[in-house]
Image (cartoon, helix red, strand yellow):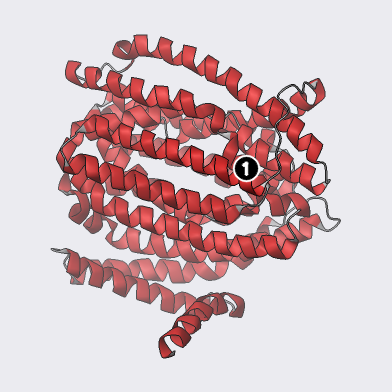
Amino acid sequence: MIPISNSTKQLKIAAIISYSVIIFNILAGFVYTPWMISVIGISDYGLYVLATSFLAYFVLDFGLGQSVTRFIAKYRAENSEENIYNFLGLTFKLYLIFAFIILITLIVIYCLIDKIFIQLTAVEVKNFKILFVLVGLFSIFSFPFKPIDGIISGYELFVPLQICNLLNKVLTIALVILALFFGLGLYSLVFSNIIAGIILIIVKLIIIKKNTTIKVNYKYINKSMAKNIFSFSGWMTVNIILYNMLVSIQPTILGMFSGSNQISIFSIGMVLFGYTNTFVSALSGLFLPKVSRIVKMEDAKEKVEELTIKVGRIQLTIIGAIVVIFTSIGKNFIELWVGKFFNNSYIVALLLILPLLITSTQTILRTMIVAQGKVKLEAIGLIFSAITSVTVSLILSNGMGAVGAALGSSIGIIFSYIIWMNIIYHKVLGVSIYRFFKECHFKFSVPIIVSILIGYLFKIIIPSENIIEFIIKATLVGSVYVLLIWMFALNNYEKNIIISPLKLVHRMILK
């Protein structure tokens, strides 16, 4: 097993690399997304988003990805390598079975595309079918390799995993830019992702071979273990499907009732939400092995509560800055970034991002739910949320387009991940939610609200006719936020997290 100290060191290094990946992806996305839209057109961009999001429903990992991480961490804690080999043998066979089922499902869906997306034109349907085939074939090919990330995380090889993620982002974006530069068009976007995906799979297999002693026992059959896998991954699958019904299903609904332009408007808002969500939750996946160890300790509840508050405050510092800047001047940014046609993307993004002020600070508690195998409780709340979200979206998307779809998503997220899950955290995990909000959110609320109000004043006083004026305004708003949380919210530990890197850079400059 990896020593605790080494594991902690890997977590820190992996966190730095993880944020580097995210920052690179965000900056690159901000640069090439408007260019990509201008090259392929708003309609084709909407089709590309529709194809990738629609197929995402059918190529889920069925909860087996987190199941792999959880069970490998569990068996490693028990020093039972043989159980790992047997478990992986069962898991890979399950993936192959699911891959065959998905293939049959996609063939049926392909035959019904004309009847599903009635708002698309004949040309758009033709292009969408080609995209569907390309994305679908690669999804089927890559599906049996989905346990790879779970294996790498289970063995706590966080640094190699994050380096792979960086490689994937750089390679994908480079290929997309190259393809569009040479005018290869819409389909080249899919081929770029396919090439980068295949290379990534090969690199991850090499990492596993060089850093572990894994021997997959494909002959192993055990009904009891299979039952344990299904009892955990089954509910994880339900959770993933239901979460997709909160957000990812909206392009499909818009494709049925509003058309490709509204899909594009929603997708820009969803992209901004995705960047924000990825940035603030970059650390969450790294804590599953650690939380799995804590679960076995006598004072598990107290340790998890302390870790939740500690990580939650750091997360709130980050998401608070994003919310303050985006709420006050986000509309100006979207106009400068992709044009006034996408003005409503600001409302879409805002409706999706605001709930992150709470949900992003509770990643440790959601990890605890996974580590304890209590994901069924999360699914129960998600069922009602998903039904509500889809119903609201179906009713509003016809008249309100992307904004109506986003409102449905926001309502669902608030009910499931804020109201319902906090009841679970308090009643089932025994965590003091009152203490959590008091120590995590109470001191931040006033600086965040005041910063937003000041940001609105800057928006009125300083116009944003060009990117320079916008950067000046964003810098001023960000500076106000940093000053206020430094004076009224952050404790000495959190201030030291900010000061330490600055001191290191200062020493390096002096040398």
Relative to 175, is 232 above or below?
above
User: Can you tell which quarter of the image residue 115 is in?
Assistant: top left
Residue 64 placement (x, y as % from top left): 63, 32
Question: In the shown orientation, is residue 281 left or right of residue 48?
Answer: right
Give whichever of 281, 394 is nearer the camera. Answer: 281
- Determine the image quadrant of residue 178: top left
| Residue 46 in the image, given as x and y percentages of width and height | 26, 32
* Residue at 82 percent of width and 41 percent of height: 80
Whether 176 is drawn above or below 234: the answer is: below
**Amino acid found under the numbered disc labelled 1:** Lys
Secondary structure beneath disc 1? Answer: helix
Residue at screen point 42% across, 26% down: 138
> Residue at position x 19%, y 47% from top?
35
Relative horizontal placement of residue 120, taking residue 222 as reference (left or right): left
Q: Is residue 166 visible?
A: yes
> Is 11 located above or below residue 242 in the figure?
below
Say left or right for 173 vs 424: left
Query: Which residue is more in the foreground, 296 or 420?
Result: 296
Where is the C terminus found, in terms of image quarters?
bottom left
The image shows a total of numbered marks equal to 1
Please name whichever residue, 432 or 177, is drawn nearer the observer in this view of the structure: 177
Percent x, y for residue 48? Answer: 29, 31
Q: Residues within 10 Å of mark 1 (few under 14, many from 20)?
A: few
Does 274 appear above or below 67? below
Query: In the rendered image, which residue does mark 1 sit on?
Result: 209
Report x, y in % for residue 440.
59, 65
